[in-house]
Image (cartoon, helix red, strand yellow):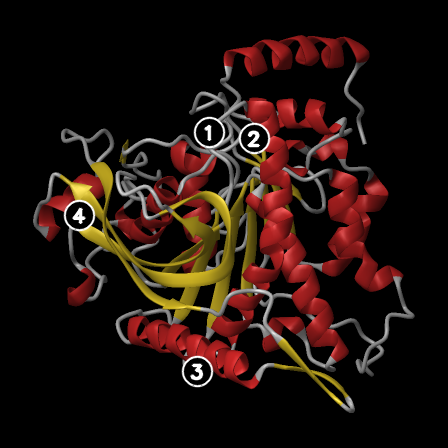
Amino acid sequence: MIMASRENTRSWRAIAILLILAGTIVLGGCATKLRELMPTPKIYPLPAAQTIFDEVPPERRKSNVDLLYITDRAPEEDPEAELPYGQQRSRFLVFGSVDVALLPRMDWKDLQRYSLSDPRDEQIVLEVGAVKELGRYPMEPYPLQADATGLRRDPDTLAAHRRANKALQAEVQRRLESAPSKQVMLYVHGFNETFATAAYTAAELCHFFGRVHVCSFFTWPASSTGNPLTSYVSTTESGQYSVGHLKKVIRTLAQTSGVEGIQLLAHSRGTAVLLNAIRELSIEAIAAGQSPAEALKFENWVLMSPDIDKDVASQQLEIFASDPDMITDWTSPHLPKFFRGRFTIYASSEDKALRLSQFLFRSADRVGQLTADDIPEHAQDYYDSVGSIDIIDNDEKRTDRWGHAYFTSNPRVSADLIELVRNGTPPGAPGRRLIRTGKITWKFPKD
């Protein structure tokens, strides 16, 4: 892999120090009460996409998006707090519904017209509305009981856990009744995000995916205030804290009757949380003699601007092939399948936020910075042999301040994401007009 030059390292060290002192490091979103709706994806002005909102079920044709949320953020104790959950870690997992309004409120035909327009002649903003907590898992750690033969879980706590599982599954099944795809979209946010900004992004994705999925997001206690440097360090460990909770969520969704698939999307530092959860769940499945793709109903894995060291990510993925002595009941001579669709990484060499992360971690490269030139031929060959792995380089000019949120701010990237998640279109096919730059690498055409 290409190492950052000493000159670039010194330059970014100086910039990082200035930004830390100024308190302006942003590696995720920003905590704002209202946010303008993302630009119209480039797919929508095309004739083939003009009917996408005509296909939305009548009960979903509203000027709001109703989302399922799951969080291990601690509840806000301040009665004046604007949001129900803050940035502290919770000892229990909760779930519920949150209404994200698209303002000004309008009838479906007008919202459809504005959603298809580029540019829009009416500004549409997002606002968090009613938040309703629907269920709560028991406080952790779950109590244990000792007897003559050893330890066991407390029966009352175990019963409460199962009731929470059933309540979450019942809520998913209720939402499945109006979901055309019978799939769950689960979005995991990154650093410097609040409950509100995570909900905004999940709502935008849900809306422009044509509202075909059960739309949900997992929001973990990422820091969004205080000194940016210490805030980022604490966020990194909060992400590790949340891996077990995200595992519990994905497992419960996969075991819900009626769920046909799970679309997993993560941004920035949230990609590390998701990738670790996937890895641990996959080990569980393989140890039970099951294919993760089928046991966990994984459709697409999508990592957007992933804030992970490239070597760490490689090790986490390659261990399944490189540790043949892993204790398992997997008896096939062939490796198990991990996803049904594709494993897609959106990267950009123009991502200024990841350059700062690269400096802070002393990392050679973050996954979200990779281009075809950064991936040697043997690595291209290796991942090509796995199949259905794509790294898409967005080398265009930045469409947001830090070049880190281009999956919503860049209409070409969001259009490509829609084709992948909604339609399952492979790269290079009609609808995803990407240019191949290597066996697993792609870029957007210049025209």
Distance between the alpha carbons at the discs numbered 3 and 2: 40 Å
Task: Kindly state the secondary structure of the residue where label 1 is placed.
Answer: loop
Residue at figure coordinates x 53%, y 34% from the top left: 444
| Secondary structure under the numbered disc 4 in the rendered image | helix
| Residue 39, x across and y down, in percent | 31, 34
Q: Quadrant of residue 120?
A: top left
394 lies above or below 259: above
Residue 257 bears which disc, if any?
3
- Sequence order check, earlier mark of 2 and 1: 1
Instruction: First in sequence, mark 3 or 4: give its number.
Output: 4
Q: Identify residue for label 2.
A: 231
Disc 3 on helix, strand or loop?
Answer: loop
Percent position of residue 152, x then y: 68, 83
Which residue is identified by label 1?
A: 225
> Alpha-carbon neighbours of circle 3 within 10 Å: few (<14), some, or many (≥20)?
few
Task: Say whether disc 3 or disc 1 marks the residue closer to the N-terminus.
Answer: 1
Name the residue at the left extreme.
107
Using the numbered discs, state the Cα–Cα distance from disc 1 to disc 4 in whole angstroms: 36 Å
Residue on which the image places disc 4? 112
Q: Residue furthest right?
A: 325
